[in-house]
Amino acid sequence: MKMSDVAKLANVSPATVSRVLSNPDLVSKETREKVMEVINKVNYKPHIVARQFRTKETKIILVVVPDITSAFFSKVLRGIEHVAVQNGYQVILGDTENDTEREQEYINLLLQKQADGMVLLTARQDKTQLEEIAEHFPMVLACEYMDGLNVPTVSIDNISSARKATEHLIQQGHTKIAHITGPINVILSRDRLRGFQQAMMSQDLEIDSVYIQEGDFTFESGYHQMLKLLALENPPSAVFVFNDEMAMGAIKAVKDSHLSVPEDVAVVGFDNIKMSSVIEPNLTTINQPKYEIGKKAMELLLKLINGESLQKKKFVMKDELIIRESSVKN
């Protein structure tokens, strides 16, 4: 069913049908009702691609994630999707699998105008290039960020959050505290390591280099890095882990080594994914307002798409330390 067919059945011109769909206020109520009656009767759907050529709008938002298997991103995506759908946009997802080349390929879709805007949940590209793209296309960065990047960004303060998590372990009486980092080429990993170091130094506690092990975000790497720490001549009595998935791997490693959490080793994670309150013992962690981060990022992107200038470009959301069984001895 074409627009011309609808026009014929309604006894109006195709231009009138087009106006009813795009600018109904320009058409009389009587004509509008006549056309809509035919549209509903024949279940006519406007041709999206044709509309795109006419309006230069796709009504599509591209969201690029570093790893779709990560439980953390599901709530961020839901926040983005809810705001997008409420405003007539569809969300298309691009999973880079932590590959910078794949990230670039998705950015190219924005450059080719196959989406009206982009939310990047990963930032591994060249800073200058991202700023150049953001000058010409609507783009918002969320969760990850870059120092000094002039692009709208929504995140938490990862340094202070990591410091808070480590201070909690120090308050529990631990002095031999290890840290399992994320990949050190990612800014979030470096910032959480910095927060860990700040907390240790503020209490004049030694930071032994063998107590810092690099993971890759996964449960398996948390498990293996924890086994390495437990094999040391003087193993740590507590560990702060980059994210909850690796922290759960660390807990399993402690249990498989016939030790217990938190009696032998206290564990603190980061993100407060759903499983952190289900695993035994329940995991102490930093809660990120995941849904709110996604919601805020999409709201900012809509402002950019609508040509509004942003008075403020950096938004730091509130985090919270959630204390559970994995770090507190009975």
Image (cartoon, rainbow, N blue to C red):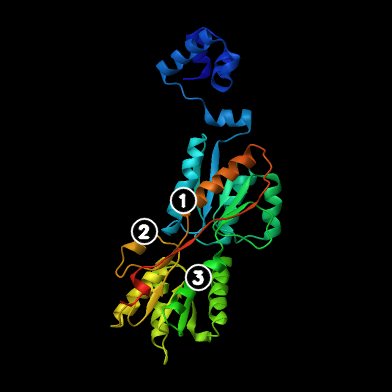
x and y, in percent, of residue 41 in the image: 40, 16
- Estimate the spatial distance between the alpha carbons at disc 2 and disc 3, rounded to whole Å: 21 Å
Q: Relative to 312, does residue 157 appear above or below in the rendering?
A: below
x and y, in percent, of residue 8 in the image: 50, 10
Mark 1 and mark 2 lie on one chain; the one further toward the N terminus is 2
Residue sitting at the far bottom:
233
Please identify the quarter of the rendering in which residue 149 is found. bottom right
Q: Are marks 2 and 3 in contact (CB under 8 Å)?
A: no
Q: Do the residues labelled 1 and 2 touch (CB within 8 Å)?
A: no
Q: What element carries label 3?
A: helix
x and y, in percent, of residue 101 in the image: 58, 59
Q: Relative to 176, does residue 195 appear above or below in the rendering?
A: above
Residue 60 has which mark? none
- Estimate the spatial distance between the alpha carbons at disc 1 and disc 3, rounded to whole Å: 22 Å
Mark 1 neighbour class, 10 Å CA radius: few under 14, some 14 to 19, many 20 or more: some
Residue 260 is left or right of residue 108, and the answer is: left
Query: Could you tell me the amino acid type at mark 1?
Result: Tyr
Which residue is drawn at the image coordinates 52% and 67% (left, top)? 161
- On the image, numbered disc 3 is attached to which residue? 164
- On the image, numbered disc 2 is attached to which residue? 274
Say which of marks 1 and 3 sits in front. Answer: 3
Q: Relative to 226, does residue 128 appear above or below in the rendering?
A: above
Please identify the quarter of the rendering in which residue 58 is found. top right
Mark 2 neighbour class, 10 Å CA radius: few under 14, some 14 to 19, many 20 or more: few
Mark 1 and mark 3 lie on one chain; the one further toward the N terminus is 3
Mark 2 and mark 3 lie on one chain; the one further toward the N terminus is 3
x and y, in percent, of residue 192 in the image: 54, 70
Q: Relative to 133, does residue 43 appear above or below in the rendering?
A: above
Residue 291 has which mark? 1
Whether residue 113 can be seen here? no
Q: Is mark 1 on a helix, strand or loop?
A: helix
Whether residue 168 can be seen here? yes
